[in-house]
Amino acid sequence: MRKLFVLFGVFVFASFFGAIDVLAQEAAEPASGFQGLKEKFIEGDWFFMSFVLICLILGLAFCIERIITLNIATTNTDKLLSKVDERLADNDLEGAMETLRSTPGPTASVLLEGLKNAKNGPSAVEKAIVSNGSVQMGLLEKGLVWISLFIAIAPMLGFMGTVIGMIEAFNRIEAVGDLSPSVVAGGIKVALLTTVFGLIVAIILQILYNYIVSKIDGIVNKMEDATIGFVDILDRNGRLGQS
């Protein structure tokens, strides 16, 4: 696990400095499309823009990790219950357990705990399912708090860069003693760019966050439906309260 975190940190910093180097090399080229967006990034305040870029890189990393994990955790519950029902109908308890062990995802883990406690009666099955379900919910929601943090902090950093840029613009007015647009236009433009990029990062991460939450809700709903059907299968095969 520690090696994964080290590799993740190397990837983040390499991506960050690589992006800065590419932007610096292409700044003088004519702007068009995405190239223009990168040029605007360079024109913003480098200090706050760097933090906004880090928020984007880290936020995307957490989002991609969650999306991949949730796709792996998605299980065809009807097919799984059908296989377990067949094993139990053949009086093959170990085969049913092996089917659940070999199936990835939280649904199979919850049903496995219920099957292990089936000999203790319906109340034990329900307690095991609820307890393990809470653990699986925590695993599904792992990392969401960090995505929420980057969604909140990216526009804040942009706003802070804008406020500081405006203060510098007014300091320039005070130093020059003239309210000429040419004196403050450049500073105000740079200040506002930090807000724009902060909002862009927040919008991208918010869309991915909502997709992840909807994916989790779908998995949880299927898991709840599967547990209801699983109890019926145990009862039909005479496994409740039977060792």
Image (spheres, helix red, strand yellow):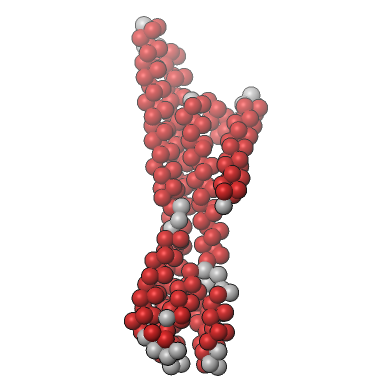
Q: Looking at the image, which residue is at 60% across and 48% down?
A: 3
Snapshot quadrant of residue 14: top right
Q: Position of residue 54 (x, y in %)?
A: 51, 37
User: Position of 148 compared to 18: left or right?
Assistant: left
Residue 22 image point, x, y percent: 64, 32
219 over 158 or under it: above or below: below
Residue at figure coordinates x 57%, y 52% from the top left: 1
Q: Position of residue 194 (x, y in %)?
A: 45, 31
Tell me: residue 1, above or below residue 238: above
Depth check: give the residue in front, 16 or 29: 16
Residue nearest the observer in this picture, 190 or 143 = 143
Q: Is residue 238 above or below residue 81?
A: below
Number of numbered discs present? 0
The image quadrant where one finds the C terminus is bottom left
Residue 5 shows in this picture:
yes
**Residue toward you, 198 or 95:** 95
The residue lying at 39 percent from left, 66 percent from top is: 134
Which percent across, then down, holds residue 5? 56, 47
Residue ID at (46%, 81%): 115
Res 34 seen here: no
Position of 84 relative to 135 (above/below):
below
